[in-house]
Amino acid sequence: MDTPIANQSNPYAPPKAAVQDVADPPAAFEHADRLARLGASMIDGVLFMVVVLAPLVLAGVLSDRRMNPEVLAAAVAIALAGLIAWSWISIVLVRANGQSIAKWLVGIKVVRKDGSRASLGRIFWRRNVVNALPTLIPLVGSLYQLADHLFIFGETQQCLHDRIADTIVVKL
């Protein structure tokens, strides 16, 4: 035996790596108050309804129960144009600063829990798409949405969709 056993490395030893915990959000970030978040949510909903759904409703009212194909086609075209414009503006704002149109108006934005910028993918997929999936299930979806919104009254002021995406909403 040329080398003593004590000097050989143990292949079964745990890896030696520096592990750091994720820090809490810096004190410099002030959580957006619940009323501002509610107001932004309502403004976003109203804007979407006015830009996308109103042309369809107006076409139905104007056609007086006999849906004229030309009126319907025009309403669908206007609604589609509104959806494209609303989506484009939303994507630009979310990518630039983590804000929807209403969050921009209210002066709040979405960031990662550690204070870093939240990516467009994180906001779109984790905050929106994953959060919308339970709503496709009758009754369960309604209960999930209620629970999601009630979580804002917790100490961290994070809804379930915030927790899923590891984000917080802060004041600018």
Image (cartoon, rainbow, N blue to C red):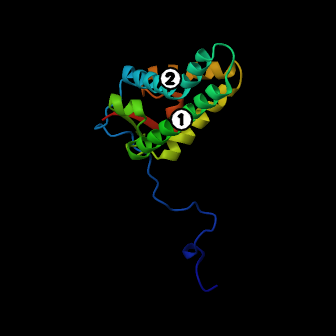
Classed neighbour count for the residue bearing mark 1: other residues with Cα under 10 Å, few (<14), some (14–19), many (≥20): some
Taking depth in this image into account, of 146 and 66 the one nearest to the observer is 66
Residue drawn 44% across and 40% down? 89
Viewer-closest of 45 and 78? 78
> Gap in Å between the C-alphas at discs 2 and 1?
30 Å
Graded by Cα atoms within 10 Å as few (under 14), some (14 to 19) or many (20 or more), the crowding at tag 2 reads some
Q: Label 1: which residue?
A: 83
Q: Is residue 59 visible?
A: yes
Sooner in the amino-acid sequence: mark 2 or mark 1: 1
94 up-or-down from 154: above or below? below
**Amino acid type of disc 1?**
Leu
**Residue 113: percent from the left, percent from the top?**
42, 40
Q: Relative to 9, does residue 87 appear above or below in the rendering?
A: above
- One can see residue 166 in this view: no
Looking at the image, how many numbered discs can be counted on the residues? Answer: 2
- Residue type for callout 2: Phe
Residue 59: x and y in percent read 59, 21
> Residue at image x 58%, y 82%?
3
The numbered mark at residue 151 is 2
| Left or right of residue 4: residue 156 | left
The numbered disc on residue 13 is none
Q: Quadrant of the C terminus?
A: top left
In this view, the residue in front, 8 or 164, is 164
Q: Residue furthest bottom?
A: 2
